[in-house]
Amino acid sequence: MPARANVIREVLARMERMGPDVLSLAGGMPGAHAYPHRFEAHLHQAFAGAAAPGAVMGYGDPRGHAPLRRAVADLAASWGMEMAQRELLITTGGQQGLYLAARTLLKAGDTVVVPKPTYPGALQMFQLCGLTLQEAQTDEQGLLVDDALEQLLARGARCIYLIPDFDNPTGATLPEPRRQRLLALAARFDAWVIEDLAYRELRYDGIAPDLLSAACRGQEAQRVVTVASFSKSVMPSLRTGWVSAAPALIERMTQHLQALQLTGSPPLQAALTAFLQDGYAEHLATVRAGYRQRRDALADALRRHFPQARLQLPQGGFFVRQDLTPGVDESAVFEYALEAERVACIPGAGFSASGTPGGFLRLCFSTLDEPNLAEAVHRLARAHDRVGGQALQQPTAVPA
């Protein structure tokens, strides 16, 4: 199967060509209001080298700036995840962490189990690495850890990838019992688990379940690789994330990273370290409150304009899955909404390894303010009604 295109990147490119008046529910990125303007002072201090002139001007440690690794270990400990620095590698964003994990754990031809639906960037990366994708079913709570998943592992799948907290695109959070059974299955079939924590810090309601890497013990602990990023909680342009795994795996990932880029950016990593120590907690409190308001504004608009549709309110993250009326073509709704109503979203097929329609649209609430969220949903509902009305007018095929 040829490697898939990244549907989100394609939609964003179309929007750019169309001009600035398109209301976007498409991209999964922080809103412009959420960027930490205080970060500039930390960056200036890093370049100035107040503690040691020129200390961050060289290549730096390929494992990452040592103070940043200590700060990340402290952050992970606040999530219930204890790790030594030899179990941690700083990466150029979460995507690089996923790539390093795939290259280290797996070989071309191996099978990775992915939820249907899931993050397109992971699907694209796994396919470009020559891996075979097998889809596992999901429900409103995320990945179904059931007999079908067990059968995939029994047939030789080597790895399971998932976003357990505030899934992209559904917003679901995997409940504790499923996490425990998933770990048990991974241990039983000697399979790896890659947990992607891109949105872990962006919780607005409820109590956080244990991380897969924190919940497991003994041999099971060696089966989990954790990938995280500061792209969503701080800003994408940092291109800074991290991966945690057993020390032997981190050593191999470090070798892969050195072959790719030698090292990350010491000044950016030094500035992020300072920000984590002074300003990050306040920043998170502010952005969480703002995103909660935007999530609720989107939900209110969806309840008004799609009263018959199921709405699952996510406890965090950036995304709401909006199911469409059965029989309504999600691709047609997407196209009409973008071209005629000037509102962008992502159709469900973009989140499937097989490219099959999912009967839903992914809506991102992070980048628009409350009035524009309401207007975007109003336009989207017009597109849905127009496409749905046209579908009802089509003659029904009679079986031969």
Image (spheres, helix red, strand yellow):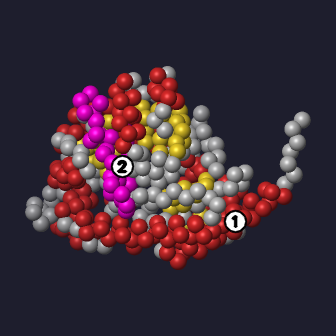
Q: CA distance from mark 1 to mark 2?
A: 34 Å
| Residue 322 located left or right of residue 48 | right
Instruction: Please state which amino acid type lies under the numbered disc 2.
Output: Leu
Residue 308 sits above or below residue 211 on the image: below
Name the image quarter holding the N terminus. top right
* Extreme residue toward the left, this view: 51
Badge 2, how many Cα within 10 Å: few under 14, some, many 20+? many
Disc 1 or 2, which lies upstream in sequence? 2
Instruction: Please state which amino acid type lies under the numbered disc 1.
Output: Ala
Badge 1, how many Cα within 10 Å: few under 14, some, many 20+? many
User: Is residue 206 covered in magenta?
Assistant: yes
Q: Residue at x 37, y 61 (%)?
A: 205
Query: Visible in this render: residue 333?
Result: yes
Q: Residue at x 56, y 73 (%)?
A: 374
Question: Residue 128: x and y, percent?
Answer: 50, 38
User: Is residue 141 covered in magenta?
Assistant: no
Q: Residue at x 65, y 56 (%)?
A: 324
Mark number, residue 383: 1
Q: Nearer the viewer, residue 294 or 268?
A: 294
User: Considering the numbered disc 2 on the image, is that residue within a helix, a strand or a loop?
Assistant: loop
Magenta residues (range): 193-221
Residue 22 sits in quarter: bottom right
Residue 25 sits above or below residue 353 on the image: below
| Residue 12 located left or right of residue 78 | right
Residue behind mark 2: 197
Question: Residue 194: x and y, percent?
Answer: 38, 38
Q: Nearer the viewer, residue 252 or 22?
A: 22
User: Considering the numbered disc 1 on the image, is that residue within a helix, a strand or a loop?
Assistant: helix
Q: Nearer the viewer, residue 14 or 59?
A: 14
Residue 232 sits in quarter: bottom left
Query: Visible in this render: residue 124?
Result: no
